[in-house]
Amino acid sequence: MATVKDIARLAGVSPTTVSWALNGKRVSEESLRKVLEAARELNYHPKMSARSLRAGKVFSIGFYIVNPSLDPRLNGYLFPMLAGISKVLAEDNYAMQFDIVTPDKLDILAKKALEHSVDGMLVLPQFSGVTERLLKELPDKFPVVYMQQDPASSPGHCVVIDQAAGVELAIRHLHHLGHRAIGVIAGPAEHVDNVLRLQAAQAVFRDLGLSWRDEWVAHGQFDMESGEAGMRHILQAPDRPTAVFCFNDYMAIGALRAAASAGLRVPVDVSILGFDDTDVAEASTPALTTIQQPVFQQGQQAAAMLMRLIKGEELPKHVERIRPAVIERSSAERRRA
Amino acid sequence: MATVKDIARLAGVSPTTVSWALNGKRVSEESLRKVLEAARELNYHPKMSARSLRAGKVFSIGFYIVNPSLDPRLNGYLFPMLAGISKVLAEDNYAMQFDIVTPDKLDILAKKALEHSVDGMLVLPQFSGVTERLLKELPDKFPVVYMQQDPASSPGHCVVIDQAAGVELAIRHLHHLGHRAIGVIAGPAEHVDNVLRLQAAQAVFRDLGLSWRDEWVAHGQFDMESGEAGMRHILQAPDRPTAVFCFNDYMAIGALRAAASAGLRVPVDVSILGFDDTDVAEASTPALTTIQQPVFQQGQQAAAMLMRLIKGEELPKHVERIRPAVIERSSAERRRA
DNA sequence: CCCATAGCAGAAAGCGGTTTCAAAAACTTC
DNA sequence: GAAGTTTTTGAAACCGCTTTCTGCTATGGG
């Protein structure tokens, strides 16, 4: 494999000149030509690790998902998020290192920072407490952008989808359609997004003067089974709600099933709203009206913020929120008289 | 940030001894204790780029997807595949670099190999011709494992889901259920998996003595819309098939819709089979009977093979095939008399 | 008691680039 | 044509770690 010395020898100049030439610094026409020619002839590409050592940076960032297992909830939005990140990094010729770590192995992330494996990282913490523990373990001043906000922690730099706005959009959409008796199927208590959604839902109920009734509220695990169970629970109430807002699409599909089993037509007898706008939302029957999280854009903005931090900009720690949107399909409609 | 010299000074030994101690080579009890203590005190972690430069390897592999755009087809299996890869790499403390590149930018991958950004790579080529072009551009002997086989190219090292086996499983399943008039909705012609599936389907039809009738065959783009259009086309035939095999789940959902629009009940009037077993298969109504691709396992095996290549094993270039499985749900049943 | 052997430690040489520093060359200016 | 200025160049240092090589000390055997 060709080194800078080989190029120097072939071009009849010094390694210094080779480096100058290849990095666009001032060299004579003559030298430039000879160096470029020699480099092309030997198919030369500077070795990353050597360049990194000298530069003190590795030209790559980490994108890490904290997850205890093979969690299919991520299927829906991982790819566009990765694509958004990748797109922004390409502008600076940065690479992305990806990994999935369990919540008990956060020291892996700390190690990656300490040994300078990456110049900065994006983190999807998922669970309460993760952000806080990371802030403690990671070296001070190490560039990190969190892609979910943990209400139980001081935030650091964040680029998140505005969960509260999404919830407000959803509930106001149902309210606008005339629904006043609204049920809720929430997600797992330890999930940061779920915590935010739950808080927001209660606030919006209060604002709109809707009553938050425990028999209309169920707690699931973000999967179809628990969504179905949750809906069954809600339908047992003596007077049932005319609409149910599920905190993700999988549970909404489950709810759809439970409604069908109970002989209820969706959306005629009961409206159902999802959250996330994953693939399943479009695939179900009826197709789900749901809240779309612009994760491609989130990936872009988070990566952009991280790159600014890496370049040394002193950004104040703040939470950058991206507004979700309502995607109207067929699972919700105006309340029948 | 602490270096090996700092540790040496603090422990009162030479850098050599520090390195020996930290890497488990023979040093005296005394030295070992002092070095470890000093390292802990300074929270020392050896710098990756320095270690890489000396070692001549970077302890990370690349996983690259060739894709022209934001292709949602990947949603379904990207995450488990990443998880499988990640799990195997963790055993060797290797990291994964991830990227999505367009087919016209394959030189990005060549560059990553030439500049030693990664020690090897896994590639999901997706389109015909990509494998061949990569084999030409990548340095000879550079460890690469392809995760899809391109019938138009000599394969290199491959770990793939056996597409032909999946197709055979699907069609024989329908045949076993009594179906003799079977339609097919194939995918885009330039997609390598689709090519293999199409060849296999024709072969199985021949073996089983089924007739391959053009009016029962449609070609879609792996998305719902084209699946729906394909099914409409097939239903126009004077005598319609009793079952339709779609080359992926999204198109199968589309087919479900077209059948419903035409007043046909699935699976009573017509059986529909998907391929991939993505999330949507379980979410649709009726839930799709489909072919499951064990992508988690594929990720593991591909990563394992790549690690063996990186460690210098001389593996013969061959195609390692993983058998898919039929997942029976509700969209296919025994043909009514 | 001396020599061979083994065990451990340190100096120094890389790995392959970039950057500093100083010298040489080219070019102005008077 | 000499002095001063700007370009261009090359030698050498450096990034931080590993590894070779050499030397020293302790141990055992003849």
Image (cartoon, coloured by chain):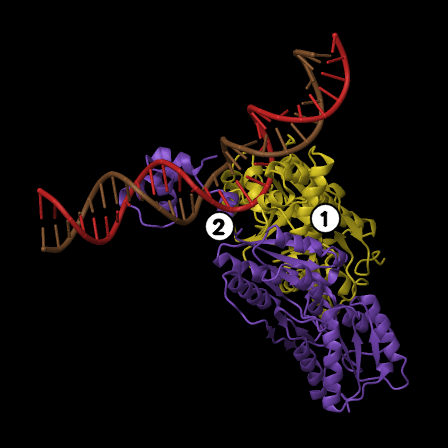
Chain colours: A purple, B yellow, C brown, D red
The reply to whether residue B184 is in sight is no
From the image, tell me which residue sits under label 2.
A55
Instruction: In the rendered view, tell whether residue A163 sits above or below residue B278.
Output: below
Residue B199 in the image: state x and y as whole percent. 65, 44
Q: B46 or A159: which is nearer to us?
A: B46
State yes or no: discs 2 and 1 in contact (Cβ < 8 Å).
no
* Callouts 2 and 1 on one subunit: no
**Residue B315 or residue A204, whichever sits in front:** A204
| Whether residue B141 is visible | yes
Q: Which amino acid is tagged 2? A: Ala
Q: Position of residue B237 (x, y in %)?
A: 67, 60
Instruction: Give the quarter of the image for residue A156.
Output: bottom right
Which residue is drawn at the image coordinates 84% and 56% (left, top)? B334
Q: What chain does mark 1 sit on?
A: B
User: Identity of the amino acid at label 1?
Assistant: Lys
Q: Is residue A124 left or right of residue B66?
A: right
Give above or below for B245 relative to A126. Answer: above
SS for callout 2: helix
State the CA–CA distance, disc 2 to disc 1: 31 Å
Quarter of the figure with residue A190: bottom right
* Residue closer to the observer: A103 or B138: A103
